[in-house]
Image (cartoon, grey):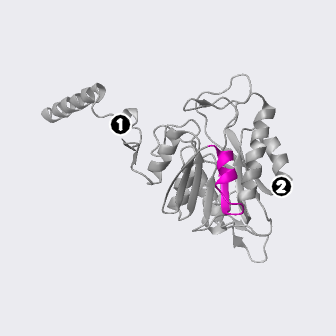
Amino acid sequence: MRLFEKNGHAIIWGDTIEALSSEIPDGSVDLIFADPPYNIGKNFNGRKDHWPSDEAYLSWCYEWLNLCIAKLKPHGSFYVMTATQNMPYFDIFLRKRLHILSRIVWAYDSSGVQARNYFGSLYEPILFCVKDKDNYTFNTDDILVAARTGATRKLIDYRKPIPTKYNTKKVPGNVWNIPRVRYRMDEYENHPTQKPTALLDRIVKASSNPGDLVLDPFSGTFTTSYVAQSLGRDSLGIEIEEEYVKVGLRRLAIQEHYNGEVLRREPKTYEQQDGPDQQHLAIFERHAQWNTTSHR
């Protein structure tokens, strides 16, 4: 296990159960966002997301879930994701230990490849849980969205003694339409299950305050830590894969070099300016410009 830290932001390179057990004090974290492997066969830089059985996977999940609960402060909040087929087990397990305030559906657009013989999945479930349902952080004003009735349709509520316009802003419901991260997005990193900054932005704003500690026990591309940093929170991310740790070191500006390697974002194919395709395109564009000018 190895620790990297700078300016209130820390990365633990290691197994999450070991790190949660030995490196993080109980009752020390304000907000946890957990997006674990789903046991659906994804390839995380050579590490296969696959357990021998559903029972083995759930047993592992229950272990880190209990550890996460122990790390939360008495007023802390816990957001947890998993595959749709596993969420019922998470729900039953957690409702005996925490208060589940919301069952959120993160809905997104199709990747273009969908099931033909059944209804393909276009969402992922998220549980929003707290330790104390009478004392937890929820910053309503920081997450308001446009209310269609008031902001778009501009309707008036005539049922009131004095007719009143509907509010133009509201707290989001539990269905969040946020696009998945695509290759051409600026935030894209080379990871099979990267979560969008917009998703974490809403969670971190809603359930933490500046200076709070935000923990992500399965950090991946360290979006949780990146968003926490941008919003003035402290962060702690745990990640077992070295390549993803390097992404975190770069995104959080903890280190510029790693074992002699300069940490840079991997260039995308369309950013390769010196390849033959780009050279031919540049020549074509120059000729097109010359032809347009010569015929004026």
Q: Give percent across and percent down for residue 274.
A: 27, 32
Residue located 71% across and 41% down the image: 82
Give the vertical position of 277 relative to 154 (above or below).
Answer: above
Q: Select label 1 or label 2 by which is in front.
A: 2
In the image, the segment drawn in magenta is 15-33
Q: Quadrant of residue 72?
A: bottom right
Residue kind at label 1, given as amino acid type: Glu
Task: Tell me the number on the disc at residue 271.
Answer: 1
Q: Is residue 31 magenta?
A: yes
Residue 151 visible: no
Residue kind at label 2, given as amino acid type: Arg
Q: Which residue lies under the disc numbered 2?
A: 97
Q: Secondary structure at mark 2?
A: loop
Residue located 52% across and 54% down the image: 226
Q: Give percent across and percent down for residue 287.
A: 19, 29
Q: Give percent across and percent down for residue 150.
A: 65, 63
Q: Nearer the viewer, residue 159 or 177?
A: 177
| Circles 1 and 2 in contact, beta carbons < 8 Å | no
Q: Nearer the viewer, residue 14 or 249?
A: 14
Q: Give percent across and percent down for residue 183.
A: 48, 37
Q: Nearer the viewer, residue 123 or 31?
A: 31
- Residue at mark 1 to residue at mark 2: CA–CA distance: 49 Å
